[in-house]
Amino acid sequence: MSIEDDDKEPQTRKAYREHQRQSDDEFDQRDQKRIKAEREYSRMHRGEKVDQPDQDIPDDVSEFRSKKIVTGDQKVHQLKRKLNLVIIGLVLAIIIVYLVLFFVG
């Protein structure tokens, strides 16, 4: 709700800026609380997920799982490779279209 809805009168620039600043401050506070709660939840559940499943799994299976985990850097590298392949494919497709248009048209 804005101040304009309450008063049904036009706001001054100063009042509007103050209202916007107040709204931004409230949003920042809510966002900080949300981030804090998410981090606490992540810390709490991260320990449970890591500790509990490996207790019942034999060593060779847990080693297989640990080798299969992909780190952030590996994901970035994979995405870079895929993007490069897509770019090369598009360039080749453009060249093929130009060649077809040149020889056919």
Image: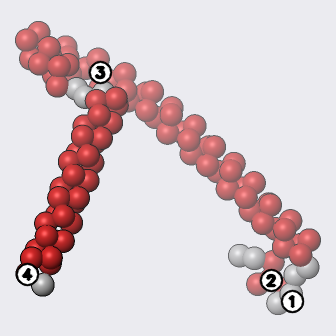
Residue 3 percent location from the top left of the image: 81, 77
Judged left or right of residue 78, residue 58 is left
Above or below for 34 versus 69: below
Above or below for 89 versus 81: below
At x 84% / y 73%, what residue is drawn?
A: 16
Around disc 3, counting alpha carbons within 10 Å, would you say few (fewer than 14), some (14 to 19), or many (20 or more)? few
* Residue 9 makes an appearance in the image: yes
The answer to the question of whether label 1 and label 2 lie on touching residues, with beta carbons closer than 8 A, is yes
Q: Quadrant of residue 8?
A: bottom right
- Say which residue label 2 marks: 4
- Say which residue label 1 marks: 9
Q: Earlier in the sequence, mark 2 or mark 4?
A: 2
Q: CA distance from mark 1 to mark 2?
A: 6 Å
Q: Can you tell which of label 3 and label 4 is closer to the viewer? A: 4
Q: CA distance from mark 3 to mark 1?
A: 58 Å
- Say which residue label 3 marks: 50
- Say which residue label 4 marks: 104
Q: Amino acid at mark 3?
A: Val
Query: Most extreme residue toward the top, as rendered?
Result: 59
Q: Quadrant of residue 24?
A: bottom right
Q: Where the C terminus falls, by quadrant? A: bottom left
Q: Can you tell which of label 1 and label 4 is closer to the viewer? A: 4
